[in-house]
Amino acid sequence: MKNIRPIEDESRPKVYIETYGCQMNVNDSEVILSILQDDGYALTEDIGKADLILANTCSIRDNAEQRIWGRLEQFRLQKKRRPGVLVGIVGCMAERLKDKLLDRHIVDIVAGPDSYRSLPELIRNVTPDSPQMNVLLSQEETYADITPVRMDKNGVSAYISIMRGCNNVCSYCVVPYTRGAERSRDPQTIVREAVDLYSNGYREVNLLGQNVDSYLWKDPDSADRDVNFAQLLEMVAKISPDLRVRFSTSHPKDISDEVIYTMAMYDNICKHIHLPVQSGSNAMLEKMRRKYTREWYLERVRKIRSVMPGCGLSTDIIAGFCGETQQDHLDTLSLMEEAAFDSAFMFQYSERPGTLAARKYPDDVPPEVKTARLNEIIALQNRLSGESNRKDIGKVFKVLVEGVSKRSPDELFGRAGNNKVCVFPAEGHKTGDYVEVEVLSCTSATLISRLVKG
């Protein structure tokens, strides 16, 4: 079986990889490392030793791209100090900007999300006067046959990409343009990857997709053997009761009763759903092309909580989308109250070139209004998170230990099945153990706990 950890070999050329953006990008970096490791490279965490510097990029928001432009100056300095060093921009920003990334004469390689297999060839073909680029999108590429080389530190939790691309074309989102159309991996390759991880000591897998609920593998020989997301969840959960299963992201329009009931059936499927709402206003949801209403969303929340009481629920919220009125904003706040999210990722709207919103709707909410509304959303979520955590005081959770607490070497941390972080005394336990803890107190982000003696 292929080594799933990075190879350390001083005789090999070195690659340094910086990863920006979502969990999908983390997994993509692991795929890239696998491809380059097979081509003779070894990973280095010291940019000063790298023969090849790669930035795996995100285009979801403007500030993510601005960070990359800032880093290019540091990469230029590396090239100046050590002639022969190559710089590559890969991922979504490479797909969106293409040859514009070559204008500053710093970048040697531009590779989109579906062209990672070509990286060895691109690297070999680079000359001082001939940078290389491949940004072709694919209808078939899933990298299903590539075993990612895991770059995580703890060896406990790993990402598995189950599908790529997106067909939803929400009006604000660049993902369909940078990652292409939706396609699902063969479920057997996913199960094999999870089995390999478990046999190598991993105790949690996180199944990834832009919209996992639309996962559908169509068997070329028989429609009776097609596999949907609920069935895939069950297949992975059956590997071992000691292997935890998480997933993200769920689209509210697609999350089915079958998925909810499958989660409830298996103790090792974590009871947490990330369900991005984006707005509580039907007018905004329609303009965003989210394909559901406020009422539909809240019905899904009620269904989740009726089948799985205590299920963790997190979300994404955009403040100040095109044409958003004060009433639209108040609708978002009221939905947050009713849904009682445990946590949220909250952002101001930033227009992304090439999207439907950029072409059709003026970005007309003043920046100061966006900021004020975002601050209100954040303040409300902080209160909701605190209230949610206080409800857990006195409860006992099974926690998978992920590492040592930052605040004390004598304490460990891990997540309960509802995705909340628990901190507790180590008392001889180690990363990768399962422990039971009782919650004693909390902050808005953490459950302060003690070990329950067996």
Image: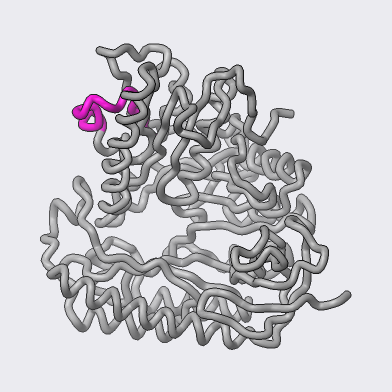
For the residue pair 249 and 220, the one nearer the viewer reads as 249
In this figure, which colouring scheme has been used for the structure?
Answer: one colour
Residue 434 within the segment the image draws in magenta: no
* Residue 4 shows in this picture: yes
Magenta residues (range)? 98-112
Left or right relative to 194: residue 291: left
- Residue 315: image quadrant is bottom left
92 up-or-down from 338: above or below:
above
Total marks shown come to 0
- Front residue of this view, candidates 310 and 266: 310
**Residue drawn at 64 percent across, 72 percent down:** 422
Residue 345 x/y as whole percent? 40, 66
Q: Is residue 105 magenta?
A: yes
Q: Quadrant of residue 115?
A: top left
The x and y percentages for residue 161 are 54, 44
Residue at the spot 70% in from the left edge and 28% down from the top edge: 2
Between 111 and 413, which is closer to the camera in this rendering? 413
Can residue 140 be seen in the rendering of this structure? no
Q: Is residue 151 above or below residue 292?
A: above
Looking at the image, residue 210 lies above or below residue 452: above
Percent position (x, y) of residue 18?
A: 44, 40
Q: Quadrant of the C terminus?
A: bottom right
